[in-house]
Image: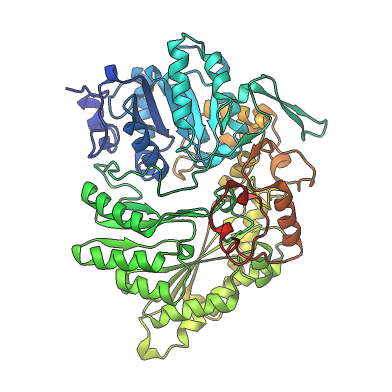
């Protein structure tokens, strides 16, 4: 019988002990004596967040289909258990076996957002693994990072043995075979890293040197090991029907953020919003067939007992078989107590018809993401959405019985003026006005328009990677401008305004585009007690400011300057398919306020067609 790493006394004292006991439905148990590789898959946040991550479910299922590998899960202990583990010297353990992570062959960490970076150090520290790769011995696990933040791995370069750039279904088998071969030949850690560096998508940071100009910008980034390539190529799965997908995902004992069956209908996006990193990283757009998705839906609902099924995509409305798939799901499951969730839909007649059929209109609100209030700004960011389309969509929704709308915008976008900021509450007011144009007897109570603004962060591999950010105070001043403008609106009683935290935004900005020198800030912040920085109740901005001061790193250098068009970026050694020349053209078009058509309308020559498929090839034969 499996022995728990935590005794009853500890479990009774901490919040949500089910986070740490494992043994959930569909979790995988294997005999450790019958596998060659032990792989700990980590999401560096609390269990409820990590268990909702589709990428880990896919890799967990894939690894465990291989007889020679046992993949287990590990999450960041919440602050209460973190304290107990340190006091009692309890090592971080994997959920399935409850055995110490330090005894595994690999520790794979997904890098989903910048504010989890100190949690990565928490995981390493609690596991008893040296924080820095240079200090690890042959007995320590190989620490590998992947996920969207791995596309600029440099702030974390000192802490990882290697990074996996791209989609995990392609190169992991080759990587693990090399590890087995190296172990069989009694090779060293260095021997394995040298062979790993030659695998597609693998980046070994210790095999590269960075040099800097006197002004602090990057002067050169060059390999220092003959086995390391000068360019690391993103890994892409082109046939989504012929790849791994978890038909029996792990079912948690407690409620998690995404407590449902998730159908990934496509990867990538045809839209080309200039602020959106995912839209560039995951090109070209690739679809799963409706038939395969129908099969997955049946199997996953049967194997989990979930009562909700959700379609996952950056832009569900652009999935070519959406009507067929949705009609199938409604016909097959709606009468069986299964709810159907359709995020990322454009609000048009078809979408509203579908939503009326799958949810209770009176209990739900609709979400629009215009991102900018003025048409000029929407053209700058290539949103591809006119005010007429927004108002028509809202009008159709109101006439269909909805009376609650959520609007999402960004502040601090390139070229933004005070007029653009004030256009946000003006657009919200026009949407409310559209509601009151409906005859009173046909309205569904009072109208409620909730507007939220986040602050823009320029991300690598987007046309806005050259843009400047603003200081914390400047962002707050912009939010204040919007807030005051809401008071001037005719329908202000129907309008509500929220804005996100600017302190977290400026930190995200530093680490989104940071170089290796910012790693010492992360380490110092962790030393000062920073963990769970994405959580408001734990986040401590003053400690972060102290970390920048103690390390002599200037936040303004990374955020408050516009990059030169010829500046070498820390992530330029990675090839994602989308070319830097295309991104420069899009930056110029943004400055001119020109809209670029989406990929189905016209090819813009981004470079992703080189992968050999996807919607960018439609109509080109």
Could you say which is closer to the camera, residue 615 or residue 449? 615
- Nearest to the observer: residue 473 or residue 5: 5
Q: Residue 234 placed where, x, y %?
A: 58, 39
| Residue shown at 76% from the left, 64% from the top | 592
Residue furthest right in the image: 214
Depth check, front residue: 46 or 380: 380
The image position of residue 342, as x and y in percent, is 38, 63
**Image quadrant where residue 428 sits:** bottom right
> Which image quarter holds the N terminus?
top left
Task: Indicate whether 73 appears above or below 438.
Answer: above
Residue ID at (35%, 54%): 292
Query: Horizontally, is 426 left or right of 331 in the view?
Result: right
| Residue located 59% across and 70% down the image | 385
Quadrant where the C terminus lies?
bottom right
458 vs 178: above or below? below
Please identify the residue farthest to the left as the structure is shown: 1
Is residue 493 at all visible to an observer of this figure?
yes
Q: Position of residue 520 (x, y in %)?
A: 62, 27
Position above or below: 323 against 388: above
Q: Quadrant of residue 52?
A: top left
* 152 vs 364, nearest the viewer: 152
* Residue 528 found in image quarter: top right
Res. 528 in view? no
Q: Residue furthest top?
A: 186
On the image, the x and y values in percent for residue 39 come to 39, 26
């Amino acid at each position: 019988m499996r022995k728990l790493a935590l005794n009853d006394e500890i479990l009774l004292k901490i919040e949500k002990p089910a986070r740490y006991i494992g043994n959930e439905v569909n979790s995988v148990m294997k005999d450790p004596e019958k596998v060659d590789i032990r792989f700990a898959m980590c999401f560096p946040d609390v269990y409820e967040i990590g268990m909702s991550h589709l990428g880990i479910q896919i890799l967990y299922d894939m690894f465990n289909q291989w007889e020679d590998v046992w993949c287990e899960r590990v999450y960041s202990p919440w602050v209460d258990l973190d304290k107990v583990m340190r006091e009692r010297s309890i090592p971080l353990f994997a959920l399935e076996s409850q055995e110490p992570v330090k005894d595994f062959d690999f520790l794979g960490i997904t890098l989903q957002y910048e504010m989890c970076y100190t949690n990565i150090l928490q995981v390493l520290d609690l596991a008893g693994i040296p924080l820095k790769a240079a200090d690890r011995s042959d007995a320590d696990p190989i620490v590998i990072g992947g996920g969207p933040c791995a596309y600029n791995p440099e702030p974390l370069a000192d802490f990882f043995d290697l990074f996996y750039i791209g989609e995990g279904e392609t190169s992991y088998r080759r990587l693990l075979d090399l590890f087995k071969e190296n172990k069989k030949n009694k090779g060293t850690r260095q021997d394995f890293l040298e062979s790993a560096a030659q695998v597609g998508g693998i980046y070994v940071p210790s095999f590269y040197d960075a040099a800097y100009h006197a002004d602090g910008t990057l002067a050169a980034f060059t390999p220092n090991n003959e086995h390391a390539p000068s360019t690391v190529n993103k890994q892409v799965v082109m046939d989504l029907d012929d790849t791994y997908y978890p038909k029996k995902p792990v079912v948690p004992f407690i409620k998690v953020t995404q407590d449902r069956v998730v159908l990934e209908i496509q990867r990538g996006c045809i839209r080309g919003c200039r602020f959106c990193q995912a839209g560039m990283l995951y090109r070209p757009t690739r679809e799963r067939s409706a038939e395969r998705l129908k099969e997955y839906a049946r199997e996953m609902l049967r194997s989990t007992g979930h009562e909700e099924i959700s379609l996952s995509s950056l832009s569900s409305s652009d999935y070519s078989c959406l009507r067929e798939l949705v009609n199938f799901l409604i016909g097959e499951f709606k009468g069986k107590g299964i709810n159907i969730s359709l995020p990322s839909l454009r609000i048009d007649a078809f979408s509203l018809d579908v939503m009326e059929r799958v949810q209770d209109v009176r209990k739900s609100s609709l979400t629009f993401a215009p991102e900018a209030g003025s048409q000029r700004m929407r053209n700058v960011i290539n949103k591809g959405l006119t005010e007429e389309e927004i108002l028509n969509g809202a009008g159709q929704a109101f006439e269909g019985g909805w009376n609650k709308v959520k609007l999402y915008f960004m502040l601090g976008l390139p070229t933004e003026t005070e007029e653009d900021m004030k256009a946000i509450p003006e657009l919200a007011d026009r949407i409310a006005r559209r509601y009151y144009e409906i005859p009173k007897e046909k309205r569904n109570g009072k109208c409620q328009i909730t507007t939220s603004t986040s602050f823009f962060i320029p991300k690598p591999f987007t046309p806005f990677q050259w843009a400047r950010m603003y200081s914390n105070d400047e962002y707050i001043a912009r939010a204040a401008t919007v807030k005051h403008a809401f008071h001037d609106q005719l329908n202000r009683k129907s309008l509500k305004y929220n804005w996100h935290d600017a302190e977290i935004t400026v930190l995200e900005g530093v680490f989104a585009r940071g170089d290796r020198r910012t790693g010492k800030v992360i380490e110092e912040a962790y030393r000062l007690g920073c963990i769970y920085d994405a959580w408001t109740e734990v986040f401590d901005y003053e400690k972060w400011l102290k970390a920048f001061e103690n390390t002599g790193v200037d936040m303004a250098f990374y955020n408050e300057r516009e990059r030169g068009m010829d500046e070498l970026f820390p992530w330029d050694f990675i090839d994602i398919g989308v070319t830097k020349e295309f991104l420069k053209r899009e930056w110029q078009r943004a400055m001119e306020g020109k809209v670029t058509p989406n990929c189905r309308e016209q090819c813009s020559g981004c470079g992703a067609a080189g992968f050999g498929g996807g919607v960018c090839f439609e109509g080109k034969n």
